[in-house]
Image: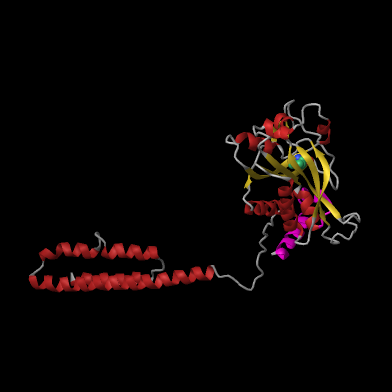
């Protein structure tokens, strides 16, 4: 048996010297230390030996086992190191190579203007509300004091879906929805941004789809001066601290009195230039005091409550703010335009 052990050891030495992978190493471990190994087989024959032989064989067998274990664990460390080195070699990165350009999208100018206006009004305690783009004639027109056949409907040429449903021509129906939904008739302070649609032929200043931001405040004792103060803050925030505003009488069926609001031209500081057509003023939005008929139809007692409303066009604000002359630029997704705008945005920061 001592001879057999010697041969076994030689066999082991030979085999382990040619091991190259973890798998092979595992096979050797099983072969020499596992339950069906030769060493195990030898120990089952130990009972046939004399006491002295048993002692000697036992010692040699233990020595062999320890030897095998040590060799295997040394080789394991070596193999792991080799594998890691191979992996590092394979995954080597040449940091001197030019990097792949990562294209980062920018915020669309219209979204940027809407975000800015939302932030301003939220800071003044307003809520931001939403409404459906497919709207009923009732909310889009009738309850806004525009009964069927009213001539002012012609100024908002509409995409009708059925006789009573249309793509909203304005965000003003959200006024109606907000007032009706407010069962307790508590004070309202909201802005409502969204898409609107009109059957216009697209050109540099018209688009069949555009955006509006509706503003609505209803409470006791709301007056025209509240509207003026609010819009002054708005104009200064959007166009600079030096801007002044003025009100011009106008007409909207759902406000009385109605006004159009101008801001002093940011390009010439009100002196007159080609942007403001030499007037020094630029029109930015329509507004007015909520018409008593609208308040009453929406369940607010017009003897007790008053309110103001305004409608801003983010496209118009963006065109003025960033010197964009063609509204179609916002919708054609020309990356050259959008990237140019992204640059402006970064410089803004
Ligand atoms: N909805 C009006 C329009 O589209 C704008 C507006 C809103 C005017 C609120 C007054 C008050 O022309």
The percent coordinates of residue 15 (x first, y second) are 34, 69
Which image quadrant for residue 165? top right
Q: Is residue 49 above or below residue 114?
A: below
**Residue 294 or 204: which is nearer the viewer?**
294
Q: Is residue 335 magenta?
A: yes
Q: Is residue 11 above or below residue 115?
A: below
Give the side of residue 320 with respect to residue 277, left or right: left
**Residue 329 or 298: which is nearer the viewer?**
298
The percent coordinates of residue 230 (x first, y second) are 71, 51
Going 27% across and 73% down the picture, which residue do you hit?
67
Q: Is residue 320 above or below residue 60?
A: above
The percent coordinates of residue 321 (x first, y second) are 78, 57
Which image quadrant for residue 206? top right
Going 32% across and 70% down the picture, which residue do you hit?
72
**Residue 10 or 265: which is nearer the viewer?**
265
Going 33% across and 71% down the picture, which residue do you hit?
73
Q: Is residue 203 magenta?
A: no
Part of the protein shown in magenta: 323-348
Magenta part, dominant SS: helix
For this orientation, the residue located farthest to the left is: 51
């Amino acid at each position: 048996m001592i001879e057999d052990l010697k041969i076994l050891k030689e066999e082991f030495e030979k085999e382990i010297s040619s091991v190259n992978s973890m798998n092979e190493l595992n096979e050797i471990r099983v072969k020499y230390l596992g339950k069906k190994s030769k060493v195990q087989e030898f120990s089952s024959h130990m009972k046939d030996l004399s006491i002295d032989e048993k002692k000697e064989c036992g010692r040699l067998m233990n020595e062999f086992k320890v030897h095998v274990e040590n060799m295997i664990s040394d080789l394991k460390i070596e193999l792991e190191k080799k594998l890691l080195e191979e992996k590092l070699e394979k995954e080597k990165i040449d940091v001197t190579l030019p990097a792949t350009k990562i294209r980062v999208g920018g915020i669309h100018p219209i979204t940027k203007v809407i975000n800015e206006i939302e932030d301003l009004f939220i800071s003044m305690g307003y809520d931001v509300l939403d409404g459906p783009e497919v709207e009923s004639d009732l909310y889009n027109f009738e309850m806004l004091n525009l009964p069927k056949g009213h001539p002012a409907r012609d100024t908002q040429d509409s995409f009708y879906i059925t006789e009573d449903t249309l793509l909203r021509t304005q965000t003003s129906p959200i006024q109606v929805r907000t007032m009706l939904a407010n069962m307790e008739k508590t004070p309202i302070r909201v802005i409502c941004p969204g898409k609107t649609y009109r059957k216009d032929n697209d050109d540099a200043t018209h688009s069949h789809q555009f955006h509006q931001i509706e503003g609505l405040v209803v409470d006791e004792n709301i007056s025209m001066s509240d509207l003026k103060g609010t819009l002054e803050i708005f104009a200064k925030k959007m166009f600079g601290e030096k801007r002044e505003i003025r009100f011009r009488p106008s007409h909207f069926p759902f406000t009385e009195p109605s006004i159009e609001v101008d801001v002093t031209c940011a390009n010439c500081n009100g002196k007159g230039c080609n942007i403001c057509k030499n007037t020094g003023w630029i029109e930015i939005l329509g507004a007015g005091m909520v018409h008593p008929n609208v308040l009453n139809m929406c369940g607010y007692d017009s003897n007790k409550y008053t309110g103001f409303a305004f409608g801003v066009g983010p496209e118009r604000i963006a065109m003025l703010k960033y010197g964009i002359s063609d509204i179609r630029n916002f919708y054609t997704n020309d990356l050259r335009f959008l990237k140019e705008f992204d640059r402006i945005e970064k410089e803004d920061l």
